[in-house]
Image (cartoon, grey):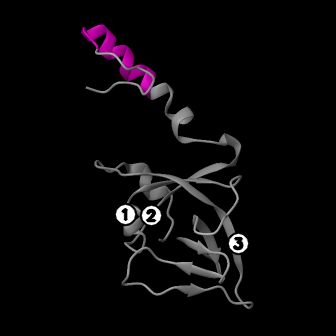
Amino acid sequence: MIRTLRQHFYLNDFINILSDYSELRTNLDDLLVLHPCATWFGVAQGDSMQDEGIYDGDILIIDRQVNALQGAVIVAQLNGEFICKIFDKKRRMLLSANPQYHAVPIRDCDTFSVEGIVIRSIRMHFKSSLQGLWSCTP
């Protein structure tokens, strides 16, 4: 059974269950998006962020309005390529969440910009044709 987060009682009939489904659908933006005008979506590619719970094919919800603090999971452009990494702001490094990958230093000669903070990731158990429209490389 799927219930909305606001409800803490048992549903007794089919009509209540149907209303729950429709309420859940209409509130997903409220639940997942903090700043609608500053939010965009991407699809993770690769396995470098798996220890942060971000897997290949996951949808990333990225917020441009949230500040990139030390240790935040960010989406950035590094030399013209989108990447998803842990931001080590103090050492100017981009860290993977998989021991198979090395840290990436942000050098003075690099073109680097933080495009937003990953505030949520959604696992897609059934792939959508829309996923091919966005991509972020973890």
Q: Nearer the viewer, residue 70 or 18?
A: 70
**Looking at the picture, which amino acid does disc 1 mark?**
Tyr
Residue 93 visible from this viewpoint: yes
| Residue at x 67%, y 79% (from the top left corner) | 90
x and y percentages locating residue 19 in the rendered image: 38, 14
x and y percentages locating residue 18 in the rendered image: 33, 15
Q: Earlier in the sequence, mark 3 or mark 1?
A: 1
- Corner quadrant of residue 67: bottom right
In this picture, which residue range is highlighted in magenta? 11-24
Q: Which residue lies furthest to the right in this view?
A: 108
Which mark identifies residue 112?
Answer: none
Marks 2, 1: nearer the viewer: 1
- Residue 19 sits inside the magenta stretch: yes
x and y percentages locating residue 21 in the rendered image: 36, 22
Look at the numbered discs 2 and 3 and tell me whether their residues touch, using CB distance below 8 Å. Answer: no
Look at the numbered discs 2 and 1 and tell me whether their residues touch, using CB distance below 8 Å. Answer: yes
Give the residue number, with chain letter if any, for mark 1: 55
- Residue 107 sits inside the magenta stretch: no
**Looking at the picture, which amino acid does disc 3 mark?**
Ser
- Residue at mark 3 to residue at mark 1: CA–CA distance: 23 Å
| Residue at x 37%, y 72% (from the top left corner) | 47
- Corner quadrant of residue 57: bottom left
Q: Earlier in the sequence, mark 2 or mark 1?
A: 2
Q: Tell me the quadrant of the picture where the N terminus can be found.
A: top left
Give the residue number, with chain letter if any, for mark 3: 113
Give the residue number, with chain letter if any, for mark 2: 44
- Residue at mark 2 to residue at mark 1: CA–CA distance: 7 Å
Q: Which of marks 2 and 3 is nearer the N terminus?
A: 2
Left-right relation of 105 to 9: right
Check the image and report above or below for 39 versus 48. Answer: above
